[in-house]
């Protein structure tokens, strides 16, 4: 979802019967707040970039996926974006990640939806 909506970050999960929605939400916020001050190593960042590169390349293996990527890129901006996708990810720095995390992971930016069994 975030690929198509700038600044969108979705967290979802399931919690056990002994956990309240409030406890789950508090745990999520604790993790997000920890991430904003995380010390991201070069090795961790490279692992993520490698995973993205393999995902992008694997997605290009079928004609249908390539066509869908071209259509989505054209819808968003320009079909040529598919040729630049990995380069955009590869250009991301640790400082940019932390800056965006600080801007995005704020309580006032949050919309929470909780589904409960009846």
Image: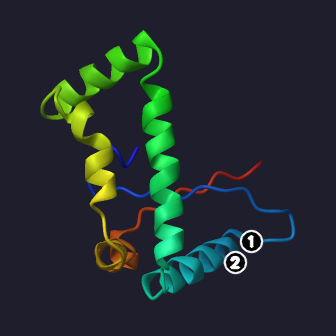
Residue 4 visible at all:
no
| Residue furthest out toward the left | 78
Where's residue 69, x and y in %?
A: 33, 25
Per the rendering, the mark at residue 23 is 2
Q: Is residue 76 above or below residue 106?
A: above
**Which residue is at the far right?**
18
Whether the residues at callouts 1 and 2 have beta carbons within 8 Å, the answer is: yes
Q: Is residue 94 left or right of residue 49?
A: left
Q: Residue 114: x and y, percent?
A: 60, 57
Q: Is residue 74 left or right of residue 27?
A: left
Mark 2, Cα crowd under 10 Å, few <14 / some 14-19 / many 20+, is few
Judged from the image, the secondary structure of the residue bearing numbered disc 2 is helix
Q: Position of residue 98 (x, y in %)?
A: 36, 79
Looking at the picture, tell me which residue is in the foreground, 35 or 64.
64
In front of the other: 75 or 97:
97
Q: CA distance from mark 1 to mark 2?
A: 5 Å
For residue 72, which quarter of the picture?
top left
Residue at figure coordinates x 58%, y 78% from the top left: 31
Image coordinates for residue 22, horizontal then vertical, percent: 65, 75
The residue at the point 36 percent across, 19 percent down is 66
**Residue designated by label 1:** 20
Return the residue nearer the eye: 32 or 43. 43
Residue at position x 52%, y 49% in the image: 51
Which residue appears at 79% of the width and 71% of the height? 19
Q: Quadrant of residue 17?
A: bottom right
Mark 1, Cα crowd under 10 Å, few <14 / some 14-19 / many 20+, is few
């Amino acid at each position: 979802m975030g690929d198509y909506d700038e600044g969108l970050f979705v967290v979802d999960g399931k919690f056990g019967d002994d956990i309240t929605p409030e406890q789950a939400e508090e745990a999520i916020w604790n993790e997000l707040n920890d991430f904003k001050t995380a010390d991201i190593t070069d090795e961790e960042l490279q692992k993520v970039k490698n995973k993205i590169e393999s995902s992008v390349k694997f997605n290009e293996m079928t004609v249908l996926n390539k066509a869908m990527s071209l259509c989505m890129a054209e819808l968003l901006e320009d079909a040529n974006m598919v040729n630049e996708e990995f380069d955009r990810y590869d250009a991301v720095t640790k400082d940019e990640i932390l800056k965006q995390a600080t801007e995005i992971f704020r309580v006032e930016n949050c919309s929470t939806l909780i589904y409960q069994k009846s």
